């Protein structure tokens, strides 16, 4: 299950990703928004982030104008590692090395085709573990106040 969300700036690329998910029989839940009316991206970041941390979704995809604001909001939820991606290399590496659990993209930055490509890479790339596990654990320690530097 993939959780999806966007604001008005990310609606078109989110809809392109939804088409890709449907064509590939990948289950998803769309938390909105659903129209091009102006909305506040933190609302959708929060819904998708909570779905991921509650294990209602394995991974999330969030889209706004740049991907930045919606990633900042999602990363305020404990357990979220949201990554803004605008090329194929980062789509792959943020799964392999950072174990990112939310992909963020910008509808004013990339094309619909690029969004689908990055989503496909993100959803099909595993976390490598090994030495990267320690680093991801350090991120969590910063988050929960136990990091010792
Ligand atoms: C909305 O105009 C825009 O600020 C938003 O989509 C996003 O780009 C924020 O980071």
Image (cartoon, rainbow, N blue to C red):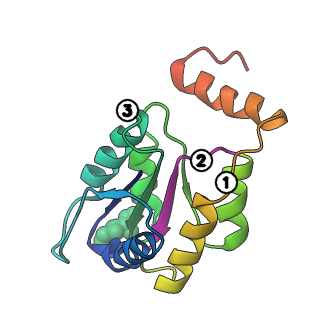
Residue reaching furthest right?
A: 131
Instruction: Quote the CA–CA distance across marks 2 and 3.
Output: 16 Å
What residue would you read off at disc 2?
100
Quadrant in which ligand 1 is drawn: bottom left
> N-terminal of the two: label 3 or label 1?
3
Q: Position of residue 109 (x, y in %)?
A: 50, 79
Q: Are marks 2 and 1 in contact (CB under 8 Å)?
A: yes
Q: Which mark is residue 54?
A: 3
Horizontal side of 122 relative to 97 (left or right) equals: left
Q: Which residues are magenta?
A: 98-106
- The residues bearing labels 2 and 1 have C-alpha atoms spaced at a distance of 6 Å
Q: Locate residue 79, reporting x and y percent.
A: 49, 32
Q: Is residue 111 visible?
A: no
Query: Residue furthest toward the front?
Result: 25
Q: Secondary structure at mark 2?
A: loop
Residue 101 higher or lower than 107, as above or below = above
Within-10-Å neighbours for mark 3: few <14, some 14–19, many 20+: few
Residue at the location (48% across, 61% down)? 104
User: Image point 26% across, 72% down: which residue?
Assistant: 8
Helix, strand or loop under label 1:
helix
x and y percentages locating residue 127 in the rendered image: 70, 45
What x and y, as percent, mark residue 68?
A: 46, 61
Q: Which residue is mark 1?
A: 94
Q: Earlier in the sequence, mark 2 or mark 3?
A: 3
Viewer-proximal residue among 127 and 76: 127
């Amino acid at each position: 299950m993939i959780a999806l969300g966007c604001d008005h700036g990310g609606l078109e690329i989110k809809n392109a990703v939804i088409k890709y998910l449907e064509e590939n029989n990948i289950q998803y839940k769309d938390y909105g928004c659903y129209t091009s009316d102006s909305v506040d991206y933190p609302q959708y970041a929060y819904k998708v982030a909570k779905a991921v941390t509650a294990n209602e979704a394995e991974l999330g995809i969030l889209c706004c104008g740049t991907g930045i604001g919606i990633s900042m909001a999602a990363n305020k939820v404990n357990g979220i590692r949201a990554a803004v991606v605008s090329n194929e290399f980062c789509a792959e590496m943020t799964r392999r090395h950072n174990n990112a659990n939310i992909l963020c993209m910008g509808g004013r930055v990339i094309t619909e085709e690029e969004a689908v490509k990055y989503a496909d890479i993100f959803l099909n790339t595993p976390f490598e573990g090994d030495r990267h596990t320690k680093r991801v654990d350090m991120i969590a320690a910063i988050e929960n106040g136990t990091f010792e530097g």
